[in-house]
Image (cartoon, rainbow, N blue to C red):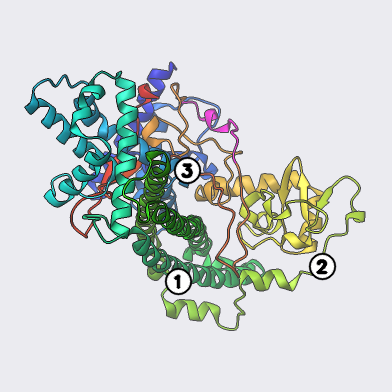
Amino acid sequence: MPPTQAESVIKNIIREIGQECAAHGETVSETLAAFMVKAVVLDPSNGFNMDRTLMKSDVQKLVKLCVSRLLDSKNPSLDTIKMQVYFDMNYTSREEFLEEHHRILESRLGSVIREITDNRACTREELESLYRKIVSYVLLRSGLGSPTDIKVVREATAALQSIFPQAELGTFLTLSKKDKECQLKELTMVVTGIRLFNRDCGKGGEGIDDLPAILQEAIPATTQHIDSQLQIAQDQAYRYTAILETVAKNPLLSMELQPYMLKEALYNMRQYETFLQIILSDIITCAQEVEMMIKQLGAQLEQLKMTVKSKTAVPTSQVFPIFIALSNLWTSFQDETVLISVLSNLTTHLEPFLGTHELLFPEKVMQNLLDGLTVKTDVCRMKEHMEDRVHPVDFRKQEWLFPETTANFDKLLIQYRGFCAYTFATTDGLLLPGNPAIGILKYKEKYYTFNTRDAAYLFAESPENYIDLIKEKAKKNAELIQLLELHQQFETLIPYSQANLRRKVTHSVQTDLSHMRRENCSQVYPPKDASTQSMRESSTRVPRPQIYIAGLRGGQGKITYGVKVNLTRAVDET
């Protein structure tokens, strides 16, 4: 089937799923529908042939199964998939977010810049109008107050006149377009630095929020909230794990509790925990940056005071670099403010994906299931077997790594997010934390951890067997592909860019189900020891931003109103 026709078929499947769900009162995004198509096709119990093209009957069956799963309001698996889709569409790494944020700000200034650089002012009125436009540009680029606030405009105009009087417009107009743009940026930074300095001296600062103080209040509050949510998530995960560990040893109990979807509930909570850790890591980075920037701000302002102290005139070569440094520093404060706001909102929007826990496992039910059981934390489990280490001499062909003999041991990219590979494979999906201290197995350039030495030895005897078992389990529970970072084994279905969870681009989409067998590269990272939440490896496999929160910079009022703007690009633009 030609690529364009295949893409059309997949689009139609997704559209039909959305329409069917809407008819039942459920709004489903195209991205979620695409993910569900993949989940249904991968599950072997649904009987789709991975080696042939979709027939009409296959399409009808596929749509029916997808709609049925998407309308199941009491399924933790669906909640987890929804959570994963939401996170992938709304989270990006710090660096990529700031890059996109700055790109958006630049694009918004485009028309204002053109009005200035294309201007051919000649008369006095035209030159005055051009100068006002430059003042507005300076305010818009700096984000320090509204260009409609007369007090802010007056202050910015006075600062601009001190370094760029209106009489210099004639020279400005003779510059090339590129040189004009460069001068506008430099003028903005110097004016911003002057206004920040005047504000510190108590002589200005109209419309300038005290961002350092705001951040010093917002960061601890946000961190405390996430810590609290993380503790709740971990406590619940430990309780589910205690029950499931007992179930794994008792086949009769396993049959009795099967309808409760305990494992699916555990996966949901572990995924929530993982996302919170990613967000918390970013906020900790924000905190570290802000702490450093506050020190730099104080030092630069002090240096400026010493430079201009008791002097009627100071060479621009001495003060301009400091003004520019102040401006750049303040831009960084603005960046951190936007980041904290976005991360805080993201945290809040993850909570609704936990709704099935109270529904399926009210406290009374949980207490009955936990009766007589010991609930252990991840740290407790690790401590239990800390001394039962692997003996490398027991293995001729396998390579084992230990903390005292391996450089950057804690930076190794552990498979399955650091959960015990053997336990997961042999208990039909129980997640127990692996303990790197007892030894990490290096197998085919990948790293595996285990919760006990016995588990490590058994896995090492036949790694491929257990790796295949894990892959088969993930086919039945598609949320495991992201939770355990199994993207090497599974290709994300990409009908078109809007449904692209990994931010990859494809112009030819296959309808053959064998398409999903193609391997692609991914990275996996070990979960951080639950006993500490202050540091975490910040690298994560996450997509570029597709949603931008607009309206977080500038404005007169104290209350900020954010507007979501979808930045997803069409296929033909990429």
Residue at screen point 39% across, 31% down: 497
Residue 209 lies, with reference to residue 413, above or below; the image says below
At label 3, counting other C-alpha atoms closer than 10 Å, the crowd grade (few under 14, some 14-19, many 20 or more) is: few
| Circle 1: residue type | Ser
Asked whether residue 93 is in view, the answer is no
Q: Give the left or right position of residue 66, taking residue 143 as reference.
A: right
Asked whether residue 470 is in view, the answer is yes
Residue at screen point 52% across, 40% down: 42
Q: Residue tagged by mark 2?
A: 388
The magenta stretch spans residue 117: no
At label 2, counting other C-alpha atoms closer than 10 Å, the crowd grade (few under 14, some 14-19, many 20 or more) is: some
Q: Residue 27 carries which label?
A: none
Q: Residue tagged by mark 3?
A: 95
Q: Picture coordinates of residue 281 (x, y %)?
A: 51, 57
Q: Considering depth in this image, is 178 or 541 the residue closer to the camera?
A: 178
Q: What element carries label 3?
A: helix
